[in-house]
Amino acid sequence: MSWGTELWDQYDNLSIHTNRGIEALDKYASFVRDRVAIESEYATKLRRLVKNYQPKKKEEEDNEFTSIQAFRNLLKEISDLAGQREVVSETLQLQIIQGVTLLSKTLREERKKCLNDGTMLQENLRTQLSSLERAKRNYEKAYRESEKAVEGYKKADMDLNLSRAEVERYKNTMTAKIQQSDDAKNEYANQLQKTNNLQQQHFNLLLPSVFNRLQELDEKRTRGIREFIIGAADVESSVAPIIARCMEGIVKAGESINEKEDSFKVIERYQSGFPQPTDIPFEDLSKVSPENLNDSQYINGPSNHLTLKGTISAKQIRKRVGIFNIFGSNKEDFSDLPPNQRRKKLLAKIAELEHKIIQETNARDGLMKMKIVYEANSSLGNPMTVEGQLNESEHKLEKLRADFKKYQGYLEKANQLQVANNSPQSNRNQLQNGHRTSRHSNGSADDHHDEGEDHPDDAGSLSRSDSEDNVAQIPNGHNNNNNGSSASPESGLGTSHTSLPGSGQGSANENAIGEDAYYETEVEALNPLGTCRALYPFEATSEGSIPMTEGEELQVIEIDQGDGWTRVRRANNSNGWDEGFVPTSYIECTLFA
């Protein structure tokens, strides 16, 4: 069905309809344009949101936590999502809006031509009809005048009073009028035939052609709207897989959060390595000499290198950098930090120096190769120009190596202090005896009455003399304390949960027993108290501890005595047993009834 056949008389309505159709196309273009603005604004705000919530430089140290890593991954996915919204906006702008604008302009031009042609055809038909109407009126006038002339001639011919000349004049008038009527009739007939032919051609050929062109124009507009709507959906569908992957990435980031791992990292970060404060011993003032009274009161007071929270004293923490950075240091060897934090700082510094040494070595090697090339071909450059840079590089390397060696020494001392003072059995002996002991260079063991320990002038958590004495004593295999036994759990002679407090007190000669004597002493194997399963992997870093892997089953031979360590054992490949201490928080125990 065509408009030219069915709507031959609806020229005005078709003109209005096609105009409204193009206006609808322009309205759709405005809709897409507003949507593009929304998409662009959404992408911009998403990017601004991601930028505003990017971790600051001072928060970079928190990246080790899975929750922070997940949030950073979330920000990356949101940034990618914003990029896809920008792709949608740009594609709609380039493909849809420009296409709709071009189509609308083309349709308006074609419609204007069609309407101009239709208007011309309508004008020609109206002109022809006007000519026909005029010819018809002329014919009607001539016919009436001829009829009137015939009637006048008949009256004159019958009137006997008129002369023959007058009758002849009426006759000539009648003949002229009849001739005029016949001419007007012929003119009218010719004009009618011409008008009918033009009208037939107008309504059967010319105007239908214009209407069919308008129909094609309107169908083109309708088809264009369909294609543009589908195209816009295709643009959205093209980015849907990437957006889906962004959503999957967000879900994956959320699933990567491990609260147990974060809790373990909090322990790793903030664990000071100091033993928990022991019970304060009772002091009988009647048995204390007056000259030692003041020192005893000061030393045994509640103020120690540990605060009530188990961290460094308030004097040493004058300024907190942030909630996750309570262990700051102003010393080169980090000796003012707790043992664990000191070791971490030293390891990080050594890794940094090692990386710098590698970089500087590569730079020096490059300069040496350049010098060799210049010496082989002087046209490329003067070897002496590289000599100064080589000397400077060598100087930097020497300084870096010296710093590397120095910090390795610091780390070795820190490890020795960790082994000497923070081994699980040593802590256990000190706890079970009810008071802490200090070790002096003379090998004697005293209670907290000894001078110099925890003195207010000491900046670190351990006094300088104590640190040096402990480092000096450990390589010799001696660990003097007032228990009369080694503090190492590997020796098996430490005070166990079955021994009585103070039962191990011996003479000075017993304190001087060598390392070989310890290992020659055999201790009766303890019966297992239960079993345990490792919740986390553990690397043995202190004396008396043993490593374990996640999920490993072990025997419990000594329960936690309040120092945070449990003594376990497992069978080894040589049909023997490996015994040692593991952190209580790393295992799940099942004790026998």
Image: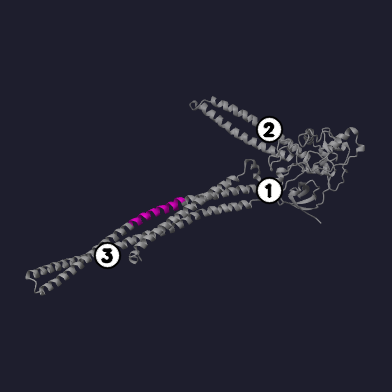
Image x and y of residue 58, in percent: 64, 40
Q: Which residues are magenta?
A: 93-114
x, y percent for residue 311: 75, 41
Q: Which residue is mark 3?
A: 199
Badge 3: residue crowd in 10 Å (few <14, some 14–19, many ≥20):
many
- Which numbered marker is on residue 262? 1
Instruction: Report the amino acid beneath label 2.
Output: Lys
Q: Nearer the viewer, mark 1 or mark 2?
A: 1
Left or right: 429 in relation to 372:
right
- Magenta stretch: dominant secondary structure: helix
Name the one closer to the observer, 530 or 427: 427
For the residue carrying disc 2, how many other residues have a C-alpha within 10 Å: few (<14), some (14-19), or many (20+)?
some
Q: Relative to residue 117, is residue 161 depicted above or below? A: below
Which comes sooner in the sequence, label 3 or label 1?
3
Please, what secondary structure does the residue beneath circle 3 have?
helix
Q: Quadrant of the C terminus?
A: bottom right
Say what secondary structure mark 2 lies in.
helix
Closer to the chain start, of discs 3 and 2, is: 3
